[in-house]
Image: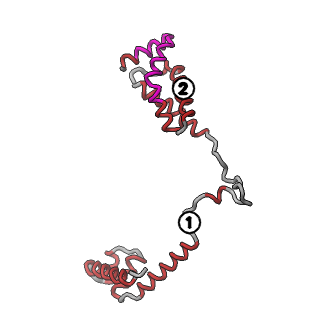
Amino acid sequence: MDALLNKRIKQVLKGDQNAFADIVSLYQSRLYQVCYRMLGNKQEAEDITQEAFVRAYINLHTFDQKRKFSTWLYRIATNLCIDRIRKKKPDYYLDAEVAGTEGLNMYSQIATNEPLPVEQVEEMELQERVHYEISRLPEKYRMIIVLKYIEELSLQEISEIVDMPIGTVKTRLHRGREALRKQLKNL
């Protein structure tokens, strides 16, 4: 196929326009599919496919025949698709007023990562409850739980602070979590 394609390219470069029709027929459907996948619009994909072939025809003298023609052609098409995507105007503007409302603009429609006030209150109540239940733990577990999960210290640091072997710290951490889990099972 490459030999046939190179022959057609040489014919086009010599002025045979019909030879380019053969090239178009070889790549038209595949090139259209690439454009359609990028743009998601049938008419735009058809336009870009046609424009890619026009550009390829005009710039065929710049094509290096040692390279693959399909790669060169797809590159032209994808660049055209990217340009089309960049030039598209947005369907709406954020500062435009929302129809049927007074004073609300599109900014008010954007989802936020901020939790709702109700969720914030529930989170604070949960934190208070967890802190209360931690305070009810026996001191030997409470101290380890606080250092690990509230102060976010490593097991090595906790071991040095409480002057206990790491194994003992791990055991108390595990037992403290289990005791806390039992206390919080109703949540």
Q: Is residue 144 above or below residue 72?
A: below
Instruction: Return the residue nearer the eye: 145 or 179.
Output: 179
Q: Residue at x 43, y 29 (%)?
A: 71
Q: Tag 1: Cα neighbours inside 10 Å, few (<14), some, or many (≥20)?
A: few
- Amino acid at dot 2: Gln
Residue 126 lies, in percent from the top left, at 48, 78
Q: Residue at x 57, y 39 (%)?
A: 85
Mainly helix, strand or loop, the magenta region? helix
Tell me: 5 left or right of 78. left
Q: Tag 2: Cα neighbours inside 10 Å, few (<14), some, or many (≥20)?
A: some
For the N terminus, give its image quadrant: top left
For the record, the magenta segment spans 6-31
Instruction: Return the residue nearer the eye: 153 or 29.
Output: 29
Q: Label 2: which residue?
A: 50
Q: Is residue 152 above or below residue 134?
A: above
The secondary structure type at the circle numbered 2 is helix
| Image quadrant assignment for residue 55 | top right
Tell me: 102 left or right of 177. right
The secondary structure type at the circle numbered 1 is loop
- Amino acid at dot 1: Glu
Q: Residue at x 44, y 29 (%)?
A: 30
Tag in front: 1 or 2: 2
Q: CA distance from mark 1 to mark 2?
A: 47 Å
- Whether the magenta-drawn stretch holds residue 32 is answered as no
Q: Residue at x 52, y 24 (%)?
A: 53
Q: Earlier in the sequence, mark 1 or mark 2?
A: 2
Residue farthest front in this picture? 100
Q: Which mark is residue 114?
A: 1
